[in-house]
Amino acid sequence: MEKDPFKEYLRESEPDKAHKGYAWSTAIGLQAVDGLKPSKYLIDTAIQNIEGKITMKEAQSLIDSYYEKRPVHL
């Protein structure tokens, strides 16, 4: 991942946004250790969660559904 799309949220004055941004950034960073890159869909969904537009449960459901419909590329 070239640019951290969550960097701006880590500097947020709103603690909830900063916390969510940190959690998403950490999760994606851990995936990068295995050479995995997040899709634009995952990043967009994460940002919706950080912005408070959807809950974490909704984000997980959307992401699970998205990846269930796509073939696994190993």
Image (cartoon, rainbow, N blue to C red):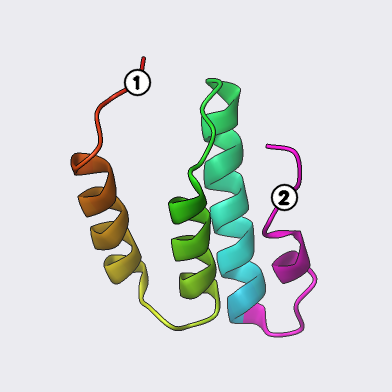
Q: Secondary structure at mark 2?
A: loop
The residue lying toward the viewer, choosing from 51 and 74, is: 74
- Eyeballing the image, is 49 above or below 71? below
Q: What residue type is disc 1 on?
A: His
Q: What residue type is disc 2 on?
A: Asp
**What residue is shown with label 1?**
73
How far from the left and from the top, in percent, is residue 61? 23, 60
Relative side of 13 to 52, left or right: right
Q: Residues within 10 Å of mark 2 (few under 14, many from 20)?
A: few
The N terminus - image quarter: top right
| Mark in the foreground, 1 or 2 | 1
- Eyeballing the image, is 60 above or below 27? below
Q: Earlier in the sequence, mark 1 or mark 2?
A: 2
Looking at the rendering, the stretch of residues picked out in magenta corresponds to: 1-15
Q: Residues within 10 Å of mark 1 (few under 14, many from 20)?
A: few
Q: Quadrant of residue 6?
A: bottom right
Do the CB atoms of the residues marked 1 and 2 lie less than 8 Å apart?
A: no
The residue lying toward the viewer, choosing from 51 and 26, is: 51
Q: Secondary structure at mark 1?
A: loop
Residue positioned 54% across, 33% down in the render: 37
Q: CA distance from mark 1 to mark 2?
A: 23 Å
Q: Is residue 12 magenta?
A: yes
- Eyeballing the image, is 34 above or below 56? above
